[in-house]
Amino acid sequence: MCPTPSPRPRMYHDVDGVLFANYTILPGARARYQLRPGVQDWFGWVTPRFDIVWTTSWSAYELEQLLKSLYLHDVWTASTYLNWHTPSVPDGTDNTKADGVRRHLTGFSGSWLWLDDQPEVFPDDRWGLPHDHFVRVPDDGARNLIDLIPSLARRLKILPCPMPLFPLPATHLSPSSFYRPSLRHIRQGVSLN
């Protein structure tokens, strides 16, 4: 079993534009807004390494239903839903995602990342935080989420013992062949050096 840092790193995770994107895998077809391929593989890699904190405009109920429908109920039960829109000031002004994340980070001394497709939600330099905590996920393209895995692993250096990352050759995104990890992929893993 791989040792995990204490406290485990947090991943602030958006839904629209991160789990869903505009793309097509059919040549010449119009891009459509749809779930990215490899979401099961994504959470198979993320869940053992991060505490997921949802920063989305989806309600907790809607997100739970989505994850259950994708057979990812374990991801829902192991994660935290950040209700960042709840007004916390007496005048009832709306909070931003940055306000919610800032409050959630109060007293937290571990590593964290924030994945979002809209860089304008990330706090500006007045926060005094290194910009490498903010990870923009392009809101188009099928592979953008899975392609983040090697860079996230290097960035946090949280892989004390190698785990398979299931490389995804572009041919696996063709309509006739959907990605399924083979024993060869599992045995090979991926070198992050």
Image (cartoon, rainbow, N blue to C red):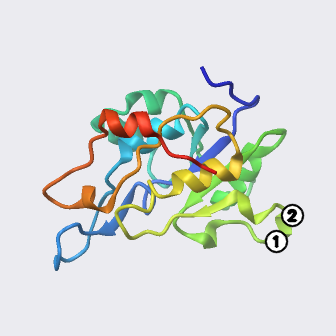
Residue with the mark numbered 1 = 125
Place of residue 49 in the rendered image (x, y in percent of width and height, measured from the top left): 60, 35
> Which residue is painted at 68% across and 39% down in the image?
158
Q: What is the CA distance from the residue labelled 2 to the residue labelled 1?
A: 6 Å
Place of residue 36 in the rendered image (x, y in percent of width and height, measured from the top left): 34, 56
Question: Looking at the picture, does residue 94 appear above or below residue 5?
Answer: below
Q: Secondary structure at mark 2?
A: loop
Question: Looking at the picture, does residue 19 appear above or below residue 41?
Answer: below
Q: Quadrant of the N terminus?
A: top right
| Label 2 CA crowd tier, 10 Å (few <14, some 14–19, many 20+) | few
The answer to whether residue 138 is visible is yes
Q: Nearer the viewer, residue 59 or 108?
A: 108
> Which residue is painted at 74% across and 31% down in the image?
5
The answer to whether residue 60 is visible is no
Q: Nearer the viewer, residue 81 or 154?
A: 154
Q: Is residue 95 left or right of residue 68?
A: right
The amino acid type found where label 1 is placed reads Asp
Q: Nearer the viewer, residue 89 or 16?
A: 16
Place of residue 80 in the rendered image (x, y in percent of width and height, measured from the top left): 57, 35
Q: Secondary structure at mark 1?
A: helix
Q: Quadrant of residue 107?
A: top right
Question: Looking at the picture, does residue 49 appear above or below residue 19?
Answer: above
Residue with the mark numbered 2 = 128
Q: Do residues under tags 2 and 1 come within 8 Å of each other at their CB atoms? A: yes
Q: Is residue 14 left or right of residue 74?
A: right
Residue farthest left in this picture: 176
Q: Is residue 191 left or right of residue 100?
A: left
The amino acid type found where label 2 is placed reads Gly
Residue farthest top in this picture: 1
